[in-house]
Image: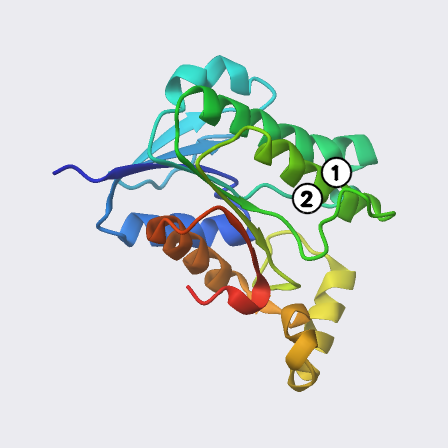
Amino acid sequence: MSGKTAIIFGSTGLTGSYLLDFLVLDDRYDKIIRFIRKPVKENHPKIKDIISNLDDISAHKNEIHGDEVYICLGTTIKVAGSQAAFRKVDYEFPVQIAEIAAENGIPVIAVISSIGADPSSSNFYLKTKGEMETAINSKKIKYTYFFRPSMLLGDRKEQRTGEYVMKNLMQVLSFMFIGPLKKYKAIHVKKVAASMIATVNSKVPSQVISSENMHG
């Protein structure tokens, strides 16, 4: 019996890079379709690369076929340069991908969101994340999972000074995040990535998974 095919968007990011490594090592998967912006030198026999900046994602509709879709896309307004550019990455691309997945009959989608995601939030970031979840839910994919981590721990390629300071502070004060505050405790990205794969393969009903429940 042949293994599964996973499709991953955002594999060069903080969480996505761990997710890709875990998928490569997982014997349940024979093929991993990876969407990346530019070619990479190193590859693995399991991985098929598709070069795209995602603005042309509809042109790749016939290549988006598999058992599962993982979306690990995300940026910040500062990195993106504007609210519109941020929304394109954190809302438009994930929703377009989900629409294609639904049209192609892919039964499982796992998406990185954020703690506090809420379409009615006055915070632009959290509102965008909440609207993204609502839009993807409307696609009616059988197994739809949203992962809402707290502050992510791990080494980013780009420097985010404020985030670096906050990470260190949250690690020092981690003993305080108990009880109702547990979901706000910082979490390492490898734990988020492991939880995504474990949840997808458990085939539990569609749900939102918060940081304190990301056990991998």
* 196 lies above or below 164: above
| Residue 169 position in % (x across, y down) | 73, 77
- Residue 46 visible within the image: no
* 113 lies above or below 66: below
Q: Quadrant of the C terminus?
A: bottom left
| Residue 162 position in % (x across, y down) | 78, 62
Left or right placement of residue 108 versus residue 135 in this view: left
Kind of residue sitting beneath label 2: Thr
| Residue 139 position in % (x across, y down) | 55, 28
- Residue 67's quadrant in the figure? top left
Kind of residue sitting beneath label 1: Ala
Mark 2 lies on residue:
75
- Residue 26 visible within the image: yes
- Residue 182's quadrant in the figure? bottom right
Q: Residues within 10 Å of mark 1 (few under 14, many from 20)?
A: some
**Residue depicted at 68% across the width and 34% down the height:** 91
Q: Quadrant of the N terminus?
A: top left
Mark 1 lies on residue:
80
Secondary structure beneath disc 2?
loop
Secondary structure beneath disc 1?
helix
